[in-house]
Image (cartoon, rainbow, N blue to C red):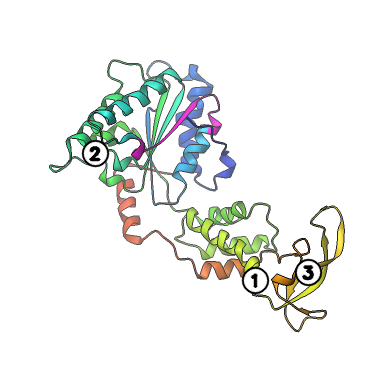
Amino acid sequence: MERPNVKWSDVAGLEGAKEALKEAVILPIKFPHLFTGKRTPWRGILLFGPPGTGKSYLAKAVATEANNSTFFSVHSSHLVSKWLGESEKLVKNLFQLARENKPSIIFIDEIDSLCGSRSENESEAARRIKTEFLVQMQGVGVDNEGILVLGATNIPWVLDSAIRRRFEKRIYIPLPEAHARAAMFKLHLGTTQNSLTETDFRDLGKKTEGYSGADISVIVRDALMQPIRKVQSATHFKKVRGPSRADPDTIVDDLLMPCSPGDPGAIEMTWVDVPGDKLLEPIVSMGDMLRSLSSTKPTVNEHDLLKLKKFSEDFGQEG
């Protein structure tokens, strides 16, 4: 069981997916009287799309917003055991626990490794897990009301067709668009001091076509390291005014910052000579971002994107 703390506002873009998840999860929990008779909430939702697009993050946002529901976050590897019959028991116990603590959400990451297509050479254990999973999702002889199964996968085409049918709603989580990518750069920078303008963020959004949210996170993390690299490689420092390390409200004028040898007041020294409480590192700049961007390539290839789009056209809906 998990208590995530991710708000809708923390998820950049994906408006279609957010709306579908609100309809499927938040409304039935908040207004159960809306879903009576033939109008029933969705029981299974599959989030599929390229790796690093925020499927797991979105699931955590759902759990946070559905604040009085129990959230079970399970990786498929948690449900696989080497002991005979143990895996089915784990699947059964998971659903049993969810029924006892409803309303509940069961989130299964990388569901494809648990519920792939049936084949002649698959093991008896794999077949039995799949069967148990189908039985539990169907809710044979038990009440599955108030339970939502959320699955996430990067390769939905390998899912067993019977399992795929249990996920009545299948939402494609695509690569982020330019405005969402710009918002991600801001989100990942957080409160770190930087000199980037709105125009810079928009430019970064345009320059990162084909990058996933995870790729952008890597670019920003690398850019955040650039000021530290400048400190390490600096041969000269100069005295500057800035907030004291001991008391940020006090401004002192003896802090040391890396500079060029030709700068007025440049002192020849390395970071080793700088006292621990006197260093003022440079702030993150657009140049740092562009340097990191030039050395970070997108991780999603065109071939997989085409397969995902095809699956979405056949079985899904756009996020």
Question: Which of 277/125 is in front?
Answer: 277
Please tell me how many numbered marks the rendered image carries: 3
Q: Position of residue 210 (x, y in %)?
A: 44, 60
Numbered range of the magenta stretch: 64-78
**Quadrant location, the C terminus:** top left
Residue 232 numbered tag = 1
Residue carrying label 3 = 256
Find residue 312 and report its horizontal and vertical position in percent: 33, 46
Q: Is residue 249 left or right of residue 114?
A: right
Nearest the viewer among 188 and 168 is 188
Lower sequence index among marks 1 and 2: 2
Name the one closer to the observer, 78 or 204. Answer: 78
Whether tag 1 and tag 3 are in contact, CB under 8 A, the answer is no
Mark 3 nearby-residue class (10 Å; few <14, some 14–19, many ≥20):
many
Label 1 neighbour load within 10 Å: few <14, some 14-19, many 20+: few
State the CA–CA distance, disc 1 to disc 3. 13 Å
User: According to the image, label 2 marks what residue?
Assistant: 160
Marks 1/2: CA–CA distance: 53 Å
Task: Say if the magenta span includes residue 285.
Answer: no
Q: Amino acid at mark 1?
A: Gln
**Residue 75 point in image, percent of width and height:** 38, 39
Classify mark 1: helix, strand or loop: helix
Q: Is the residue 315 above or below the residue 222 in the image? A: above
